[in-house]
Image (cartoon, rainbow, N blue to C red):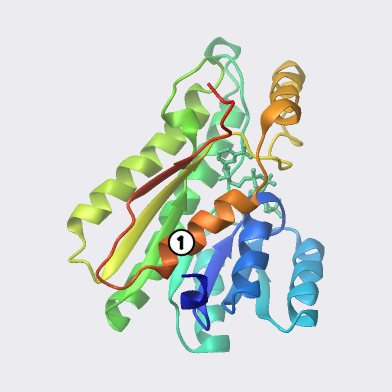
Amino acid sequence: MQNQIKDKVVVITGASSGIGKVIAKAMAKNGAKVVLGARRKNQMQTIVDEIRNNGGAGVFLETDVTKRTDVLDLVDLALKTYGYLDAIVNNAGISELSRMDELDVEGWDKMIDVNLKGVLYGMAAAIPIFKAQKEGHIVNIISTSGIKIVQMQAVYASTKNAVRTITEAFRQESDGTIRITGISPGFVKTGLVDEMENQEMKKVILKKMEQFAINPEAIANAVIYAISQPKDVEVGDIVIRPSAQN
Ligand code: NDP
């Protein structure tokens, strides 16, 4: 199944670390031409160097997904470099977990901008190209935190559930030429909480990550599975949790 992504041109946001980085490397290993976007250039340079040293194809662009023009430029880089766009993986995301009554309004704004508006900008950049090509695939990285609602994750989960809603609505609106997949990971070993302001919450999440988080490869495999399907098959929702996650 995996060689069916050979030569596919795939844009991946949030590709400088964690799940996005592993998606980029795994796709390139399977022959896809990857276009990485995130804010940290040095990290992406290292990833692209590694991909090319292993015989793969990849480019990157400094991209802030909260800026629509940056996301348009990223997609444009895919077209200019490889002449086509097969898929976009809207993966960039942040988590600022806190109680609602702590009123971390700044954190709420940031999550809405990156996790929700960033995904919308990715879709808005790719859809016109997919329409012109009469094919394309959108993969949105969501989260199990929108499926099982727990304390401290109100706004994070809300942004993720907004993306879940948009993903399903788009699926219904699409005539099938543009496919869409939502992938909801549970705890995955990444640096997602490294920048978290709430130190108490950070400790709780890091402990869970240590205890049972799965490797990002599990998510990369799911992206490859979704994108590998024949044109008449659309994988809608994939939920991947550690077996021990309740
Ligand atoms: P990381 O923190 O390792 O990666 C997040 C990525 O998003 C980084 O590459 C970061 O790059 C990028 N990013 C953040 N803000 C922006 C921005 N404004 N513009 C462009 N890129 C940005 O975390 P994960 O790999 O864990 O997270 C990836 C996705 O998976 C997120 O959407 C997250 O919500 C989701 N997820 C993660 C889970 C987990 O347990 N790890 C569980 C469920 C979902 P840079 O800083 O260079 O811009």
From this viewpoint, is residue 207 visible?
Answer: yes
Residue at 71%, 21% (x, y): give it: 198
Specify whether residue 90 is in view. Answer: no
Indicate left or right for 231 with 159 as reference. Answer: left
Rendered position, 126 above or below 196: below
Residue occupying image coordinates x 34% and y 68%: 127
In-image side of 141 versus 217 (left or right): left
Q: Quadrant of residue 41?
A: bottom right
Give left or right: position of 8 versus 212.
left
74 up-or-down from 145: above or below:
below
Mark 1 Cα shell of 10 Å, populated few (<14), some (14-19), many (≥20): some
Where residue 160 appears, x then y in whole percent? Answer: 45, 37
Q: Residue at x 31, y 64 (%)?
A: 179
Residue type beneath disc 1: Tyr
SS at mark 1 in the image: helix
Q: Tell me residue 240's x, y (percent).
A: 50, 41
Tell which residue pokes out farthest to the top in this image: 101
Name the residue carrying label 1.
Answer: 225
* Residue 131 position by quadrant: bottom left
Residue 219 screen position, x and y as percent:
56, 50
Q: Is residue 90 above or below residue 72?
A: above
